[in-house]
Amino acid sequence: MARLINIGFGNAVNVSKVLAVINPDAAPIKRMIQNAKEEGRVIDATQGRKTKAVIFLYGNQLLLSALQPETIAKRMAAGTEYDTRGEEDE
């Protein structure tokens, strides 16, 4: 069963697909984001807000969120926010 957490503005991510949640302020991370955008590997879930967290996913994709990394980490540790209600993982 997939465990989904809210990453802001009604968007959710499957916790089992997350590798890391990091702050986007460092220059190397900004370069990673720019390169991923050019390659079409970015999922932007900020709804036009400032990117405050970058979520690295399996499959070499980056997910941008307007929530703080600490908030996302707490939600991941706390448990299920959304539940797929019995659907099997792919």
Image (tube, rainbow, N blue to C red):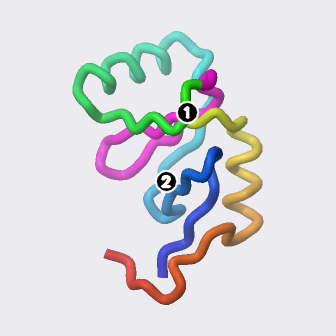
Residue neighbourhood size for the residue with mark 2, other residues' Cα within 10 Å, grouped as few (<14), some (14–19), many (≥20): some
Residue at the spot x=62%, y=17% of the render?
Answer: 25
Residue at the spot x=68%, y=48% of the render?
Answer: 72
Type of amino acid at the residue the image marks with label 1: Gln
Kind of element beneath mark 2: strand
The numbered disc on residue 47 is: 1
- Depth order, front residue of 55/66: 66
On the image, the x and y values in percent for residue 36 come to: 32, 26
On the image, the x and y values in percent for residue 11 come to: 55, 51
Q: Is residue 4 magenta?
A: no
Q: Is residue 75 above or below residue 57?
A: below
On the image, the x and y values in percent for residue 21 come to: 58, 41
Residue neighbourhood size for the residue with mark 1, other residues' Cα within 10 Å, grouped as few (<14), some (14–19), many (≥20): few
Q: Is residue 58 magenta?
A: yes
Type of amino acid at the residue the image marks with label 2: Val
On the image, the x and y values in percent for residue 16 come to: 48, 65
Q: Is residue 83 above or below residue 59?
A: below
Residue farthest along the top direction in this orientation:
27
| Dot placed on the residue nearer the N-terminal end, 1 or 2 | 2
Residue at the spot x=69%, y=37% of the render?
Answer: 67
Q: The C terminus appears in which quarter of the rendering?
A: bottom left
List the residue tagged with mark 2: 18
Q: Rounded to the nearest whole Å, what is the CA distance between mark 1 and mark 2? A: 20 Å
Q: Contact (CB < 8 A) between labels 1 and 2? A: no
Q: Which residues are magenta?
A: 49-64
Q: Using residue 39 as the reference point, say whether residue 67 is left or right of it.
A: right
Q: Is residue 60 above or below residue 80?
A: above
Depth check, mark 1 against mark 2: the one in front is 1
Q: Quadrant of residue 50?
A: top right
- Depth order, front residue of 20/55: 55
